[in-house]
Image (cartoon, rainbow, N blue to C red):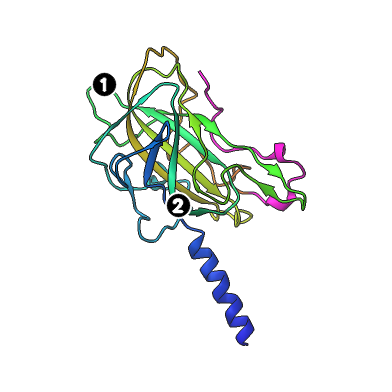
Amino acid sequence: MRFFTGFLLAIACTAVHGHYTFPRLVVNGKPEAKDWSVTRMTKNVNSKSGVESVASGDIRCYQSKNADNITTIPAGATVHFISTQQVNHPGPFQFYLAKVPAGMSAQTWDGSGEVWFKFHTEMPAMTKDKQLTWPGQNEYKTTNATIPKSVPSGEYLLRVEHIALHLASAPNKAQFYLSCAQVKITGDGNGNPGPLVAFPGAYKTSDPGILINLGALATPDSYVPPGPAVWSG
């Protein structure tokens, strides 16, 4: 009985320590001044729990409040987010941008509508013991992503997500850990980013990259990341 109780406690501790937030954006190796200064504070700042319903409004930015500042990012820059705890669950990192409409500010705009385009995603590899593993797994930060040089200048919301798939064989059990940063992209880009999607709306519970038994995947390239195709400019 003691062994069983200890086993349950170990599982509970593992579950808690597996949760995380992304409170600080890093641009070309330079982090924002402090947590949540340009990254919008998320509702899980204390609980560290992820979003499970892709139909929830929280799937967009999960914010509890907007940030006070906007940071400048040159097109072509490398970005990532610092994690509060080790990202130890299997699953992809994905990065999106949404351009703030004319006359509005990244400090107040809510990111609603079909305005988001994906510019980075990660695919898994297979370990020697036939387990899928993703870039960035077991790190205290997200993977790096590069802002395409052809992104038009202006203010944007920069969204990162990590989709934890360790329980994803049951509906609504994939866990989304995400943040949105308020940014201003500079440069002379004249691209036309797309396809554009909305959050919620971009994902369905039944998407093969969300409702998935990882043990049933025969090869890494059989994983299908949810959402639109990556726009690279």
147 shown above or below 163: above
For residue 51, the mark is 2
| Magenta span dominant secondary structure | loop
Left or right: 103, with 221 as reference point: left
Residue 14 among magenta residues = no
Tell me where the magenta segment starts and ends, as one range.
212-233
**Residue 221 found in image quarter:** top right
Q: How many marks on residues?
A: 2
In percent of width and height, residue 26 lies at 40, 37
Left or right: 73, with 7 as reference point: left
In percent of width and height, residue 159 lies at 41, 37
- Element carrying mark 2: loop
Task: Say which residue appears at 47% left-offset and 51% top-offset.
Answer: 53
Earlier sequence position, callout 1 versus callout 2: 2
Task: Say which residue appears at 26% left-offset and 42% top-offset.
Answer: 67
Q: Are marks 1 and 2 in contact (CB under 8 Å)?
A: no
**Residue 114 found in image quarter:** top left
Left or right: 225, with 75 as reference point: right
Q: Residues within 10 Å of mark 2 (few under 14, many from 20)?
A: many
Residue 228 among magenta residues = yes
The image quadrant where one finds the N terminus is bottom right
Q: Which residue is mark 1?
A: 102
Task: Say which residue appears at 51% left-offset and 45% top-offset.
Answer: 162
Task: Say which residue appears at 53% left-offset and 41% top-offset.
Answer: 93
217 shown above or below 192: below
- Cα–Cα gap, marks 1 and 2: 30 Å
- Element carrying mark 1: loop
87 shown above or below 191: below
